[in-house]
Image (cartoon, helix red, strand yellow):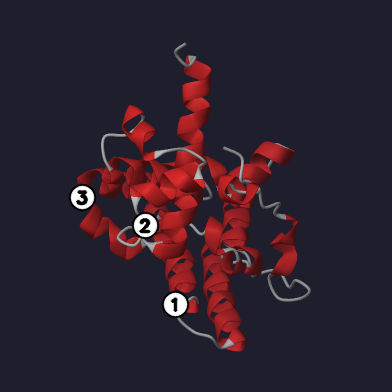
Amino acid sequence: MPFTPAHKARTRTRIVECARLMFNRKGFDQVSIDEIMKGAGLTRGGFYNHFSSKEDLYAEAVRSFATCNPFARETERLGDHRSPKDAARRLVELYLSDAVLNDVDQHCPLIAIPSDVARAGLEPRSAYTFIVRRMLHVFRGAFPASDLRGTAKAQVILNLCVGGMIIARTTDDPDLRRSLRSAALHQAFRLLGEPARQRKGSNRSSTAIRRRRSPIEKGDG
């Protein structure tokens, strides 16, 4: 008896979720199709019912971050009644937060595996571009359409967020990791027209992010 379209969609989603976590942990080259399918509780034989290649899956895993990132989950959970500027501020706060830095499984592909995109082909590069444009859209919305420098400022904020997190991940000095992200947040908030708010415990306000159990951790075939 053939599987229903709904079952096939759920299976595909499970594969993508497992792939995104494994690519974040190990990188594109160090993860095999067999590992991904085993992590999803499936056999390799079913892989090609959903994807044409590992590169195809990689691109889908990168693209999926647009709907599973902490900002998107928070918006879905609480509803988004914020102004465009408030949304941009919140995205900056979450992106540079302790909770996001410490949760490798949920890292944005832009900071987790940027070096992989050049080796993985054109489709993953397109997926990265999709994520970049989604973030830029949020940041650009914080500035009036009449602001001729709005696009440039949005791009600088993106660079601060991504660059700040990439550099912070390269050091094992907790104070330096914190100060690098704090400096990036401060400058991003200045561009948004507001000094960075003082928060208790540095930028730990995002501990409210609820991390979903991965299919790997669930162990449910």
The amino acid on which the numbered mark 1 sits, given as a three-letter code, is Ile
Residue under pointer 2: 31
Residue 218, placed above or below residue 50: below
Tags 2 and 1 touching, CB below 8 Å: no
Could you classify mark 3 by the number of other residues whose Cα lies within 10 Å: few (under 14), some (14-19), or many (20 or more)?
A: some
Residue 208, placed above or below residue 172: above
Q: Secondary structure at mark 2?
A: loop
Residue under pointer 1: 167
The foreground one among 90 and 70 is: 70
Task: Give the residue at the far top of this rendering.
Answer: 1
Q: Earlier in the sequence, mark 1 or mark 3?
A: 3
Where residue 3 sits: x, y (%)? 47, 16
Where residue 70 sits: x, y (%)? 61, 51
Q: Earlier in the sequence, mark 2 or mark 1?
A: 2
Could you classify mark 1 by the number of other residues whose Cα lies within 10 Å: few (under 14), some (14-19), or many (20 or more)?
A: some
Q: Earlier in the sequence, mark 3 or mark 2?
A: 2
Residue under pointer 3: 121
The residue sitting at 51% across, 64% down in the picture is 191
Q: Secondary structure at mark 1?
A: helix
The residue sitting at 70% across, 36% down in the picture is 79
Left or right for 126, reference 61: left
Where residue 31 sits: x, y (%)? 36, 57
Q: Nearer the viewer, mark 2 or mark 1?
A: 2
Left or right for 42, reference 90: left
Q: How many marks?
A: 3
Where residue 124 sits: x, y (%)? 29, 47
The residue sitting at 61% across, 59% down in the picture is 94
The residue sitting at 78% across, 74% down in the picture is 200
The amino acid on which the numbered mark 2 sits, given as a three-letter code, is Val
What is the distance, in whole Å, between disc 1 and disc 3 at their CAs?
25 Å
Quadrant in which residue 206 is drawn: bottom right
What is the distance, in whole Å, between disc 3 and disc 2 at their CAs?
16 Å
